[in-house]
């Protein structure tokens, strides 16, 4: 069947417009989905880790012990599948007294602060019971909380079953869509007890309902715009064929084809480069395409702005994480940072590659300085000792793990020269004692004990720490009688 040029051109333009529209919608929708989902998952995982650092591990351990005692001694365990039933309510009542305790309220305040500060849907603590494949709620700071003792089955999301064999991985971010809560991204980070074992998990739920709704609205708006433009293209194509002006049509068609081949994450200028001055509908089509290009560029800029905002949110979470590892008085890394370092060293012991030492340093007479001269002078003494330790052990990480306690992890050159550095430290302290031009709180006195990891006798980092601590106390008894504050 022979077709007229008008029919052929109209059909060709229609096909091109449909392909262009569909590709644009698909690419835009794909970009938005990937960017938003990726950023939300990353935000959830970063926030879960931040919450885990904020929580008092000792308090969490106490709360878990109380809840676990009731949970394990309850023969008829009722899961959240029976939420609202008499059996479920009777089961939850067993945990009612726990919510009135000081530990529960303290942890609730911490989690609620994190929830409000980050404007998320839910922040909560759970622990996993491998035998029954249960997730048991310890505390939920959301507006519609799950009560302590509430049980969810791990089999609801089979990927979560990995946490039974590998508890340290926590709950990597995953997305769910339920009738009750809609679209949610959930992530969980582990909390560790004093022995380095996983105690429980800090969980975060972030709603994606609003961003999903905006994405659907944007896609529909884009489809409507492109549909309108498609109709306009077809009408103009008929007029162009009637005037046998195929060259401008070819120019526009080529620009449309090339448009889809260029990067979709930057502004396009293919149509803006066209210079068609026919004074009729072809020129109008050219201007319409330029307007379409301008609108699409605006949408792309909106996507990039959203990505930038999400990046700033991630940066803020990173800054909160850094603050959680820093001691406010001295600027040194704190007990939380030291606990993470212990995990790294323990891993090197388990792998048979450990080579490190621990220097335990304790400031003497801090209480006497505080009582006699005030806490501001005590702070000066702490910072003075901090500077001395950092100057001498300038190749090793230094941690303040208590009011007057410092720990240095010796590795590499500082490990090899540990005896020499210990002598330099003691001599420096001794010289300070003799310098009567200094104030009492500036002539700091300190004890030091150093222990080197011995694979023959040491099984854990704690073994090395205890030996260093004992040597420090021996040194403290030797030097403490040499000065009166």
Image (cartoon, rainbow, N blue to C red):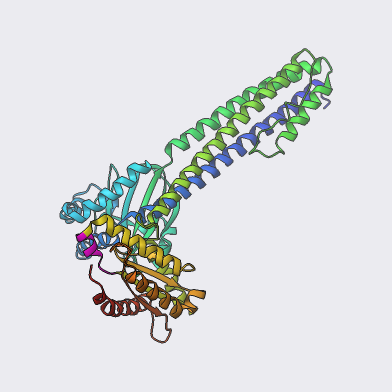
Q: Is residue 120 visible?
A: no
In the foreground, 337 or 254: 337
In the image, residue 220 sits, relative to residue 243, either above or below, namely below
Q: Is residue 290 left or right of residue 158?
A: right
Q: Is residue 24 left or right of residue 358?
A: right
The residue sitting at the top extreme is 279
In the image, residue 364 sits, relative to residue 177, either above or below, namely below
**What's drawn in magenta, residue-wise?**
364-372
- Quarter of the C terminus within the rendering: bottom left
Q: Is residue 374 visible?
A: yes
Q: Indicate the position of residue 408 as horizontal and vertical percent values.
A: 41, 70
Is residue 369 covered in magenta?
yes
Q: Indicate the position of residue 45 as horizontal and vertical percent values.
A: 44, 52
Q: Indicate the position of residue 162 as horizontal and vertical percent values.
A: 43, 63
**Residue 18: quadrant of the picture:** top right
State the residue at coordinates (68%, 40%): 263
- Quarter of the N terminus within the rendering: top right
Magenta stretch: dominant secondary structure: helix
| Image mark count | 0
State the residue at coordinates (43%, 65%): 390
């Amino acid at each position: 069947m022979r077709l007229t040029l008008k029919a052929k051109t109209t059909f060709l333009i229609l096909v091109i417009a449909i392909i262009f529209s569909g590709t644009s919608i698909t690419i835009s929708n794909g970009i938005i989905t990937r960017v938003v989902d990726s950023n939300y998952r990353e935000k959830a995982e970063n926030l879960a880790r931040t919450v885990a650092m904020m929580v008092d591990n000792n308090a969490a351990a106490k709360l878990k012990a109380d809840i676990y005692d009731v949970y394990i001694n309850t023969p008829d365990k009722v899961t959240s599948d029976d939420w609202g039933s008499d059996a479920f309510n009777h089961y939850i009542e067993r945990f009612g007294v726990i919510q009135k305790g000081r530990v529960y309220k303290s942890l609730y305040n911490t989690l609620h602060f994190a929830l409000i500060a980050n404007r998320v849907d839910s922040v909560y603590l759970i622990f996993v019971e491998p035998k029954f494949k249960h997730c048991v709620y310890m505390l939920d700071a959301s507006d519609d909380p799950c009560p302590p003792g509430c049980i969810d089955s791990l089999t609801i999301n089979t990927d979560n079953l990995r946490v039974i064999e590998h508890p340290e991985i926590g709950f990597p971010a995953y997305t769910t869509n339920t009738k009750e809560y809609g679209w949610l991204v959930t992530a969980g980070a582990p909390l560790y007890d004093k022995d380095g074992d996983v105690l429980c998990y800090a969980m975060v739920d972030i709603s994606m309902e609003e961003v999903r709704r905006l994405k659907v609205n944007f896609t529909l708006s884009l489809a409507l715009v492109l549909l309108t433009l498609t109709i306009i293209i077809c009408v103009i194509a008929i007029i162009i064929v009637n005037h046998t002006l195929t060259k401008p049509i070819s120019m526009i068609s080529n620009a449309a084809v090339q448009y889809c081949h260029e990067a979709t994450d930057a502004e396009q200028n293919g149509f803006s480069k066209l210079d068609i001055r026919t004074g009729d509908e072809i020129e109008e089509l050219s201007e319409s395409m330029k307007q379409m290009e301008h609108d699409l560029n605006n949408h792309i800029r909106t996507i990039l702005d959203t990505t930038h905002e999400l990046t700033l949110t991630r940066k803020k979470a990173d800054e909160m994480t850094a603050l959680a590892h820093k001691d406010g008085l001295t600027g040194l890394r704190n007990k939380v940072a030291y606990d993470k370092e212990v995990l790294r060293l323990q891993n090197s012991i388990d792998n048979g590659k450990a080579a490190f030492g621990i220097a335990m340093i304790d400031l003497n007479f801090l209480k006497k300085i505080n009582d006699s001269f005030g806490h501001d002078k005590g702070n000066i003494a702490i910072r003075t000792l901090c500077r001395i330790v950092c100057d001498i052990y300038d190749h090793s990480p230094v941690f303040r793990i208590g009011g007057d306690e410092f720990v240095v992890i010796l590795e590499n050159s500082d490990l090899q020269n540990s005896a020499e550095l210990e002598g330099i430290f003691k001599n420096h302290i001794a010289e300070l004692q003799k310098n009567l031009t200094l104030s009492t709180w500036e002539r700091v006195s300190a004890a030091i004990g150093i222990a080197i990891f011995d694979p023959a006798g040491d099984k854990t980092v704690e073994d090395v720490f205890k030996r260093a601590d004992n040597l420090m106390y021996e040194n403290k008894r030797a030097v403490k009688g040499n000065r009166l504050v």
